[in-house]
Amino acid sequence: MSTTATTTTAGPETAADTANTADAADIGDAAVAEGTGSSTAVRPARRGRRRRGLAPGKRLPASRLIGPALFFALWAAASAAGRLDPNAIPAPWTVLSTMGRLWSDGTLPTDVLTSLQRAGSGFALGLTAGVTLALVSGLSRVGEALVDGTVQLNRAIPTLGLIPLFILWLGIGETFKVAIIAIVVYIPIYLNLYSALSGIDHRFVELAEVQGLSRFRFVREIVIPGALPGFFVGLRLGVTGSWLGLVVLEQINATSGLGYMMFQAQNYGQTDVILVGLLIYGVFGLVSDSAVRIVERRVLSWRRTLNS
């Protein structure tokens, strides 16, 4: 009897303990499940957040025209509000009216054509000299010893300071103007192309030697692709330099050209005519730089850069 009672009494206690243990296990599992569920709920939320890109983003349409358009808008607004002295800084519509008058008179087309011819001739000569000297200096130690020091010396001398000497050497005609523009152009082209050639990874040279490439194939397949980015940087600087040099040179014993037109306008106090010349120089510089950029983008389309 006692054994049975004890067994009967112990049975419910064991069942209760088992039930309590089961309840505790269920609570623990629920807590774990809840914790797991909350963790799972947080992780997709974190994963679902889109990481902010580090690249500049998509290129804005006509982005290079936004700055000049904003500048002209502020200029027009300040002129309309009477904030600018019309004798010192004429309004944009006054400058455009003067440009139309000069164009209809036939003066402006002649000056523009003359300036384009001078800038084009000097740029072509400077481009040829810069590329040739950079290749000689960048691909040969002997060429580097003969060329690089001379070019660096020339770079340290102010180019416009050579004008009196070139006038004595070449006369005061068109030849010295073209020569000065060529010097202004070839220096940045040489410096950037030579730097690009010197910066080619030597592992590519070792790879070409292992592959048994000839000198011609080495230049064509490794040197030229590796140096093109630096070349285009120098080309852009050279294009801009040709216009900068032209402004000064056309004021020295010239009978036509945009610089000559601006110099004559200075003598007569015609500020609107000076602004016409500056505006045309700016447009030429922007268009030529944009043209080089377009060519660069097409030639170097294989590159993946931050800008692209």
Image (cartoon, grey):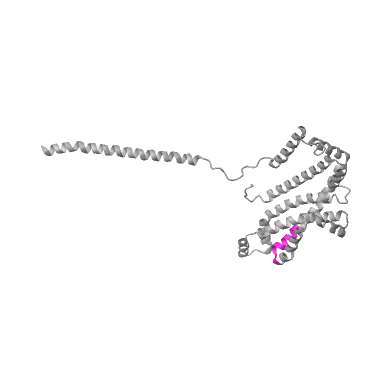
Q: Residue at x 77, y 54 (%)?
A: 185
In which image quadrant can residue 280 be found?
Answer: top right
Whole-percent x, y for residue 93 in the image: 80, 35
Whether residue 134 appears in this view of the structure is yes
Whole-percent x, y for residue 276 in the image: 81, 41
Is 94 in front, or is 40?
94
In the image, the segment drawn in magenta is: 130-141
Identify the residue at the far bottom of this view.
142
Is 205 in front, or is 92?
92
Vertical placement of residue 28 versus 251, above or below: above
Provide the major secondary structure of the magenta segment: helix
Was residue 132 drawn as part of the magenta stretch in this picture?
A: yes
Residue 192 lies left or right of residue 279; in this view the side is: left
Identify the residue at the far left of this view.
1
Vertical placement of residue 207 versus 25, above or below: below
Was residue 110 drawn as part of the magenta stretch in this picture?
A: no
Q: Residue at x 81, y 56 (%)?
A: 161
